[in-house]
Amino acid sequence: MPAVTAAPCTGCAECAGVCPTQAIALAQDGARTDVSLDRGLCVGCNLCVETCPTGTIATDRSTRTATRRREDLVLSNRAITPRPAAPSGGKPFRRSLAVREVSTGDSAADLEVIATTNAVFDVARLGVQFVASPRFADTLLVTGPVGRAMREPLLRCYDAMAEPRLVIAVGTSAITGGLYRGGYAEANGVTDLVPVSSFVPGDPPHPWSIIHGILLGMGRDGG
Ligand code: SF4
Ligand code: SF4
């Protein structure tokens, strides 16, 4: 995914011009240009990286991309005041997790979620199992942009789960709606519907990133 580096920005605005989801914002601070890039809106098209002449926006190959707070998905070249650690799901989920996935229409993210269960990524070795009913689930894992028609089924699934429960938003579509945001289907993601425990950006995210988001929810990643 793209990241914002310390390389000085010229303020040419090419990156913001090519971004299809308005994920990049620029602000002038005297002679300096502040760049912020919201991974919760980013679909990973790489156009900003290809366009930036200074390397201020560059590719970051890390798969530790999940966060516990929505605001931590916004990367910036401003000096950041360190924030206190975000709360985790806590003790109830540290040893095992039963996950119910609800796909609201993102086959690419669904395939990557399935990949977490294969022999390469093997999420089951961490005590994580996918279950067929919300009644057996600790965690609601959401993919897709949550259009108007999927809101009610999603909320019924969430209401059927016992507390305490987690919600993991997997993929940029699930976080904000991504490319569909603001469209006729009102597909603006899950963030405003239910409390989200961890956010996994990417369109689609890599299976390691999804596992990172699951571990953050479980409180096993440490950050
Ligand atoms: S990679 Fe992300 S931030 Fe960059 S142009 Fe594409 S959608 Fe926008
Ligand atoms: S980040 Fe790069 S492309 Fe964007 S305004 Fe700065 S120099 Fe231009």
Image: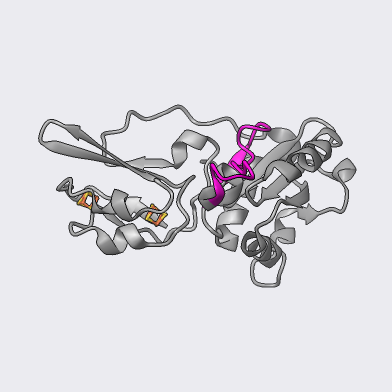
| Residue 99 image position (x, y, % from top left) | 77, 49
Residue nearest the viewer, comparing 183 with 4: 183
Name the residue furthest front. 184
Where in the figure is residue 79, as x and y percent of width and height?
A: 26, 34
Residue at the farthest left position: 31
Is the N terminus in the top left, top right, bottom left or bottom right quadrant?
bottom left
**Left or right: 158, with 28 as reference point:** right
What count of labels does the image hold? 0
- Is residue 91 in view from this perspective? yes
Residue in the image at 22% along x and 57% along y: 55
Does residue 199 show up magenta in the picture? Answer: yes
Helix, strand or loop: magenta stretch? loop
Image quadrant of ligand 1? bottom left
Figure check: 220 above or below 53:
above
Provide the residue span drawn in magenta.
Answer: 180-201
Depth order, front residue of 33/127 = 33
| Residue found farthest to the bottom | 119
Q: From the top left corner, tell me how far across and down residue 125 is, in percent.
A: 72, 60
Provide residue 69's location: percent of width, then percent of height: 52, 35
Q: Residue at x 26, y 36 (%)?
A: 78
Check the image and report above or below for 81 versus 55. above
> Quick check: 181 left or right of 77?
right
Residue in the image at 34% along x and 61% along y: 47
- Residue 200 among those drawn in magenta: yes
